[in-house]
Image: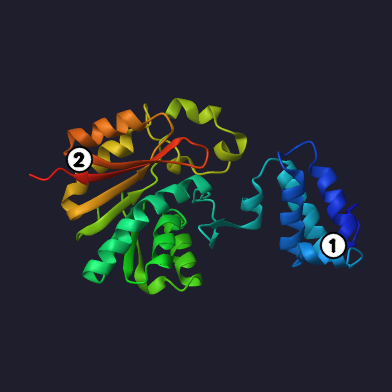
Amino acid sequence: MTDLPDALGPLLREARARLGTTVDDPALDARLIVEHFSGTTRTQAIADPERRLGAGIVAEIDAALRRRAGGEPVHRILGYREFYGLRLSLSPETLEPRPDTETLVEAILPFVKAVAAREGRCRILDLGTGTGAIALALLSVVPTANATGVDLSAGALATAASNAGKLGLADRFTALQSDWFEKVFGRYHVIAANPPYITTEDIGNLQDEVRNFDPRLALDGGADGLNPYRTIAAEAARFLETEGRIAVEIGHTQRNEVCEIFAAAGYVSGGAFRDLGGNDRVIVFERIKP
């Protein structure tokens, strides 16, 4: 049994009140949960607040509110997150894609378009693909691009492949289980990655919603948070087309260190990009010409 009312308007108000002291934006989270499980819209809630919802729907909303009040992120409860205009399903094995990562898509997109226009195609390698967010966002804009999404997690790859299918991009997206470049073959115009970059020591200091629900494999970048960048910088050249580009997301304090790692491996920065909060977020690298 639940104490939630079954009329849409009152239910929304009660949902907001229930989340009021436990989450940052109770009005938004309550609306997202109620709309998702009831199949209603904000307009319907305003125009028809007395609309009755079935007991089963109210029970689902009640359970979802309890999960949210217990600290589970709202998009984990909904099972999807919007990214670059795409609805991407989530799974326990995937990082929840966040708006900051859209900075990477915007940073490399002009190059992807230019290659596709010049050569009739653009091959993209997305390392640590997770939900497939970066690769699928680029494919959704550039119809002659193809992408291989690499992940160590079979569960993440299944989610990425499913997302590609739902978005009508399955014929241009390949899921590959690999420990970074271990099983990668061929050459790519673009290598993109949002790698784990949190130091092992700092994992315990992350927000509960991140620490408890995002997979550790997608967060832990080693003792100094830079191990994945060392791997990418050391091994990427064998898989990068001449005049190709590498685009990586970074932690907001890591710009100098990441640039030094890539410079030592023969790369020069082709641009650094900040996220909407004004923090350093993405660096694009290109090989130094011999």
* Element under disc 1: helix
Identify the residue shown where x is 30% and y is 38%: 229
Quadrant containing the C terminus in the rendered view: top left
Give the x, y percent position of residue 48: 88, 67
Above or below residue 166? Residue 175 is above
Q: Is residue 16 visible?
A: yes
Which circle's residue, 2 or 1, is located before the other in the chain?
1
The mark found on residue 83 in the picture is: none
The mark found on residue 46 in the picture is: 1
Q: Amino acid at mark 2?
A: Tyr
Identify the residue shown where x is 86% and y is 66%: 47
Q: Amino acid at mark 1?
A: Ile
Give the x, y percent position of residue 8: 86, 61
Above or below residue 253? Residue 178 is below
Give the x, y percent position of residue 242: 15, 55
Report the number of discs.
Answer: 2
Above or below residue 251? Residue 104 is below
Distance between the alpha carbons at the discs numbered 2 and 1: 56 Å
Look at the numbered discs 2 and 1 and tell me whether their residues touch, using CB distance below 8 Å.
no
| 241 displayed left or right of 230 | left
The mark found on residue 267 in the picture is: 2
* Element under disc 2: strand
Give the x, y percent position of residue 247: 32, 47
Q: Which of the pair 141/76 is nearer the observer?
A: 141
Identify the residue shown where x is 79% and y is 36%: 21
Q: Classify 10 Å Cα crowding around label 1: few (below 14), some (14-19), many (20 and above).
A: few
